[in-house]
Structure formats: structure tokens, C-alpha cells
């Protein structure tokens, strides 16, 4: 009898990857903590986090310069890195679930192209726009966010007929819309002078260098709200793997799920791209890696993507700050340099096994 | 009880179902048969609320056209003719998708019991995409069974809508799966199954509905519906119906299409 129940519980465990996914989640929290500490500890200046902490604990004063480096430069940058990395990875995972395709990326729903257009509009035409002065330092971010958000909403409208959104239409129209936005961006870049062109190119390559407490005051709510709402989509995205009809038969409100997913992606990616520029590959590589390890169950995939995305972006930012210190390499270049070949390697290695 | 009155469905401007009347009772296995393209799947999609339709469909008193997906899902489960699956889920994970959110029962025990009923013991850890066509179909059936585990719930009978549940199975598994459906009906649940195998239908169904050209041409018991003339009209080929002393009518194909 004991034997029987033992073999039964063994059988239960088979095919059940949720335990492993939870364990990985805890490991990722540790990784993220380490990445945060390294982000605070390492940088172009010789300020030492440990000395500062040590002094603080002993009740001694920390030098003004160290305070500024740690508190006003590195900490906001670390927080921004966490938010942006989590936003990009979670948006990728949500979109891949929605399109039922592991290659979907926020770029697909026109977010990135819309953001670029928004950014270039104010960089090139900024002087002529009436509201430009009002927004001051937030100008590029706000405009990029508006661009990203409007592109996605236009796309949603195009793909929705009689209250039902066609994901396939969205995919195709997204390509057309992105091409259009890129053409407009191209026209504006053509009109730009050298300084504007340089501004735009750097924005487009992505960087966390602009992180500051004042920028965080808008980025934190805009990014974290969709992030915290995203787990609500998990069960629905799992069911959607069976197709829209079967998901509906399982009791899912499919149209509401699609709306929720699109809002979350437009919000999170729009804000992330707006404050940090174009940072590629996080949205594809992170969820893909996690699916390889623990399977596609979105209840764990979304949370783990947030953790891994945040940690990876912090590490990439660390590289970007130190590789050619005191200068900085744009982080988008690093994620593409590391992410591109890594992704190709995964594809080559995976080809023979189950089609992902 | 399932009642569809004057059910019509158009794809674009093309009428596919015209004025279909259909009833099915809990405790019975109702089979829908008919040639390819006669509208069987379309009818099933309409009465399960997947397709918009004209007419009136009620399932256990619920107005299907306006019911919330969640309410429908708690009384009926649907096995589509094809179920694609994105992403590499394991068999266990696929069957678990059928477990409803508020389920109070021990989910894993029931998932394993469902896999046992469809003859897939020990398949829990396999990737769904790695399985053969017939195995995949049985995994999906297990998922559907889990969704309406009790044939009769507190609020009345549960329903299974199965579109060709045995079409890609070997004869042993055909019998096994039909027996699962039969048992569900015998325990008080309702089963509506689209079938192509007329002999299996005659063996297991309480009621047969014959579709042709987007309409119902005959319904009743297998003995009533399966007559040489009726089948010849519907399928366009010669079929001989005989009676077996114990198990009712059996059908022997004679010659291929008449119009060749
Ligand atoms: N999405 C669609 N758009 C247009 N016409 C369709 C669509 N789906 C089905 N039809 C048409 O509706 C008719 C009925 O199709 P249905 O799928 O209901 O047939 P069926 O009886 O289930 O056939 P089979 O035995 O091959 O499964 C067919 O003529 C088919 O061409
Ligand atoms: Mg069919």
C-alpha cells in the first residue's frame, strides 16, 4: 500500500514544473538583489558603497560627494534599470502569450516605432512646439510615451471589428504602421541638424544615464502599475495557448483579456521606452530563457520575467558604465551585442527539440 | 436540456445552417452525423456560443447567446475538431487548464484520473507536441472531462460537446472513449457528439441527428434514422443497413458514389 501511494505521488510530480518555477523565482530575487548592490557599488567614480555604509553604521558623516554619487546618481539609475528591465521582459512575455508566438516583441505592436517618432518630433521640432517649454526635462519622455501609446491605440482600433480584436490583423497592421512611423522619423531625421541628430541617435540606442529622482516620479507609477496588474492576465494567457475559441469555452472573457494585455503592454513598454530609449532583445530573450527552464505557465513566467529582466538590465547597465569608463556605451548596444548571438545560439541548439 | 430553435448561421453572406431545430436531453448521448461540410461543426459551434447565430438556443435554461463565458463554462465543456497548442506545455499542464478557478476538489488526483480514463497513464511529463495525433486528441479529451468532472452538479446536469472525439483513434481507443462518453451520460450528464463512424454511433447513441446541406434531414433513434434510403440520400452512396440481433443496426458500405 505504501508502495502504491508512493508511486502515485511520483507520478503526480511528473510534468509538474511549478515547484521548479517557484524555486527559480527565489533564486532570481537573490540575483536581483546582487545586481542592485553591484549597481550601487560599481561606477565611474571611486565612491565605495561599503565605506559609506560602514561609516553610516558607525555614525560618522558620509562625504557630500559620496552622498551625491550614491543617492542622486547610482540609486535612481538602479531603480530605473529595475523598472525598465522588468517592463520590457513582462511586456514581451504578455505579447508572446497574446500572439501565441515566442517571437512577438513590443516592437510588433508599434510601441517602439511610435515612441521613436514621438521622441524625434520634439527633438527636431521642439523649438516650435508651444508646450515644449512647459515640460522642460520631461519633454522627450512624455512625447515618446504619447507616441508609443497612440500607435498602439490606433493599431487596436484598426484590428477591432464589432467588439472583437483580430490578433493576426494587429500583427500585420503593426508592421505597416511601424514602417510608416519609421518613414516619418526618417523625414524628421533628414531635416535635423547635427546636434539634434546626435541627440536622437543616442536616445534611440537606449540608456539609463538620464535617470534622476525627478524622472522617476513619473516613471515609477507609469511602469509599476501595469507591472503589478500583469499577473491578473496569467491564467487567461495560459488558456489562450489553446486558441481563442477553446479559451472562451474554458470560461475566459477573451476580448477583455486582449484589451487588458494591450493596455498593459502599451503602458509598461511605452513608459520604459520613453525614459530609456530603444533597448532591444530583453523582451524576447528573457521570457524565452525562462520557458526553456520552467515551461510556459504564465503564472510563473510573468513574475520570473520581471525579476530576470530587471537583473539582466542592471548587469548590462553595469557593463555599459564600466567597459569604456569614464565614458558610457549605450545600454541598447550591449543588450543587442549579448542578446543577439545568445538568441541565435538558443535557436540553433533548440532546433531539433520541440518547436517553441 | 439543450434546445435550439430555428437556428441559422451565415459565414459572411453565405448561409451555412438554415432553420435547424435540435433538442438533446441530459442522461443521453446525442450523435450528430452527416457528410463533410453539412454543417455539423457549425451547429456545435453555434450551440456552444462560439459563433454568432440567428435563433434561440437554451442550455439548461440559460440563453446561450447572452450568457457569460464563465457561466457557460461551469455547465458545459467543448472538445473542438482541432485544438492547436502554442508553447511547449506538458500533458499534465494541458489537462490542468481544464480545472476551473474555484475548483474545490483535489486537482491533481482528478487530472490523473482523467488521463487514466482516456488511456494515457504515465504521460503526465510528456510534451504535448511530441505526442501522436490520436494521443493529442485524447489529452484534449481529458482536459475537457476535467472541466465538467461531475456529470451532475448541484445546479443540474453538466454537458459535453464533442466534435469528432474518436476520428483519429484506433478501434480499441474508439471503444474506450465512446464508453467514457456513454458513462458520462448514464450518470446523468448530457453528451452531444459529432460522429463519422455510423456503426459506433448506432452502438452508443440514444439519439441520432442526421445533417445534410446545412439542415437536419432526420432525427430519432439509430434504427429510425439509419435506413438505406435516408443514408443514400444524405451521403450519395449505397449503404446497406442490417440488424444485429443484440446491438441494433449495423452499416455495410456497398458501392462508391452514385453520381460517378
Ligand atoms: N470560417 C468559415 N468561413 C466560411 N465558410 C465556412 C467556415 N467554416 C465552415 N464553412 C463552411 O460551412 C460549411 C459547413 O462546415 P462545417 O465545418 O460545419 O462542416 P462539418 O459538417 O463539420 O464537416 P466535416 O465533417 O468535414 O467536419 C462548409 O461548407 C464550410 O465550407
Ligand atoms: Mg466538422
Image: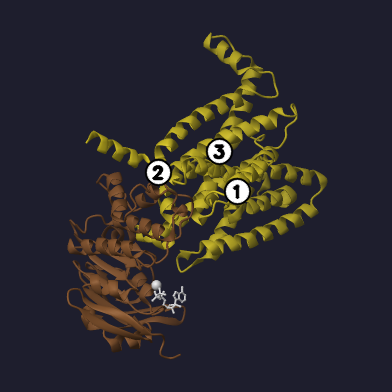
Chain colours: A yellow, B brown
The image shows residue A27 at horizontal and vertical percentages of 48, 30
Q: Residue A145: give its label.
A: 1
Residue A346 against residue B225 in the figure, above or below: above
First in residue order: circle 2 vs circle 3: 2
The answer to whether B4 appears left or right of A136 in the picture is left
Nearer the viewer's eye, disc 1 or disc 2? 2
Where on the image, by quarter, is ligand 2? bottom left
How far from the left and from the top, in percent, is residue B256? 41, 85
Query: At x 62% / y 31%, what residue is drawn?
Result: A315
Picture residue at 68% right of the left edge, 48% below the top: A119
> Which residue is the site of mark 2?
A15
Label 3: chain? A
Q: CA distance from mark 2 to mark 3?
A: 26 Å
Q: Mark 1 to mark 2: distance in Å?
A: 42 Å
Judged left or right of residue A54, residue B13 is left
Residue position marked by numbered label 3 in the rendering: A309
Where on the picture, by quarter, is residue A38?
top right
Q: Secondary structure at mark 3?
A: helix
Amino acid at each position: 500500500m505504501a508502495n502504491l501511494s508512493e508511486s502515485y505521488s511520483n507520478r503526480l510530480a511528473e510534468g509538474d514544473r511549478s515547484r521548479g518555477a517557484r524555486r527559480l523565482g527565489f533564486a532570481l530575487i537573490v540575483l536581483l538583489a546582487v545586481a542592485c548592490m553591484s549597481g550601487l557599488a560599481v561606477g565611474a567614480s571611486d565612491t565605495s558603497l561599503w565605506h559609506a555604509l560602514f561609516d553610516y553604521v558607525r555614525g560618522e558623516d558620509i562625504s557630500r560627494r559620496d552622498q551625491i554619487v550614491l543617492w542622486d546618481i547610482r540609486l535612481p539609475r538602479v531603480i530605473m534599470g529595475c523598472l525598465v528591465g522588468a517592463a520590457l521582459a513582462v511586456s514581451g512575455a504578455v505579447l508572446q502569450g497574446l500572439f501565441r508566438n515566442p517571437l512577438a516583441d513590443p516592437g510588433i505592436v508599434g510601441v517602439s516605432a511610435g515612441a521613436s517618432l514621438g521622441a524625434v518630433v520634439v527633438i527636431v521640432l521642439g523649438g516650435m512646439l508651444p508646450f515644449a517649454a512647459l515640460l522642460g526635462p520631461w519633454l522627450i519622455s512624455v512625447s515618446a510615451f504619447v507616441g508609443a501609446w497612440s500607435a498602439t491605440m490606433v493599431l487596436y482600433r484598426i484590428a477591432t471589428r464589432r467588439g472583437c480584436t483580430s490578433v493576426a490583423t494587429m500583427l500585420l497592421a503593426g508592421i505597416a504602421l511601424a514602417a510608416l512611423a519609421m518613414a516619418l522619423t526618417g523625414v524628421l531625421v533628414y531635416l535635423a541638424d547635427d546636434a539634434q541628430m546626435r541627440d536622437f541617435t543616442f536616445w534611440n540606442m537606449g540608456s539609463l544615464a538620464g535617470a534622476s529622482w525627478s524622472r522617476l516620479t513619473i516613471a515609477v507609477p507609469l511602469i509599476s502599475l501595469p507591472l503589478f496588474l500583469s499577473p491578473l492576465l496569467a491564467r487567461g494567457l495560459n488558456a489562450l495557448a489553446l486558441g481563442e475559441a477553446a479559451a472562451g469555452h474554458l470560461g475566459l472573457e477573451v476580448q477583455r483579456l486582449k484589451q487588458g494585455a494591450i493596455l498593459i503592454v502599451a503602458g509598461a513598454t511605452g513608459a520604459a521606452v520613453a525614459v530609456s530609449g530603444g533597448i532591444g532583445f530583453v523582451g524576447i530573450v528573457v521570457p524565452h530563457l525562462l520557458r526553456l527552464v520552467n515551461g510556459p505557465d504564465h503564472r510563473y513566467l510573468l513574475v520570473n520575467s520581471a525579476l530576470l529582466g530587471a537583473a539582466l538590465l542592471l548587469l548590462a547597465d553595469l557593463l555599459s558604465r564600466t567597459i569604456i569608463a569614464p565614458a558610457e556605451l549605450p545600454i541598447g548596444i550591449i543588450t543587442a551585442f549579448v542578446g543577439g548571438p545568445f538568441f541565435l545560439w538558443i535557436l540553433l541548439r533548440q532546433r531539433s527539440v520541440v518547436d517553441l | 436540456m439543450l434546445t435550439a430553435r430555428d437556428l441559422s448561421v451565415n459565414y459572411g453572406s453565405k448561409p451555412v445552417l438554415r432553420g435547424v431545430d435540435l433538442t438533446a436531453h441530459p442522461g443521453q448521448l446525442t450523435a450528430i452525423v452527416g457528410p463533410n461540410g453539412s454543417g455539423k461543426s457549425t451547429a456545435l459551434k453555434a450551440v456552444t456560443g462560439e459563433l454568432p447565430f440567428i435563433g434561440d438556443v437554451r442550455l439548461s435554461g440559460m440563453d446561450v447567446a447572452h450568457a457569460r463565458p464563465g457561466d457557460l463554462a461551469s455547465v458545459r465543456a467543448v472538445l473542438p475538431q482541432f485544438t492547436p497548442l502554442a508553447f511547449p506545455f506538458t500533458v499534465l499542464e494541458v489537462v490542468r487548464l481544464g480545472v476551473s478557478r474555484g475548483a474545490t476538489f483535489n486537482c491533481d488526483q482528478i487530472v490523473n484520473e482523467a488521463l487514466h480514463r482516456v488511456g494515457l497513464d504515465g504521460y503526465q511529463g510528456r510534451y504535448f507536441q511530441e505526442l501522436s495525433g490520436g494521443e493529442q486528441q485524447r489529452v484534449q479529451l481529458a482536459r475537457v472531462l476535467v472541466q465538467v468532472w461531475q456529470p451532475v452538479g448541484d445546479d443540474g446536469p453538466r454537458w459535453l460537446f464533442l466534435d469528432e472525439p474518436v476520428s483519429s483513434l484506433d478501434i480499441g481507443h474508439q471503444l474506450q472513449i465512446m464508453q467514457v462518453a456513454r458513462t458520462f451520460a448514464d450518470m446523468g450528464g448530457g453528451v452531444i457528439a459529432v460522429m463519422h463512424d455510423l456503426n459506433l454511433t448506432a452502438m452508443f447513441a440514444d439519439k441520432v441527428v442526421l445533417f445534410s446541406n446545412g439542415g437536419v434531414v432526420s432525427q430519432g433513434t439509430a434504427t429510425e434514422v439509419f435506413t438505406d434510403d435516408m443514408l443514400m440520400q444524405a451521403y450519395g452512396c449505397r449503404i446497406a443497413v442490417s440488424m444485429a440481433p443484440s446491438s441494433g443496426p449495423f452499416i455495410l458500405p456497398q458501392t462508391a458514389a452514385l453520381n460517378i
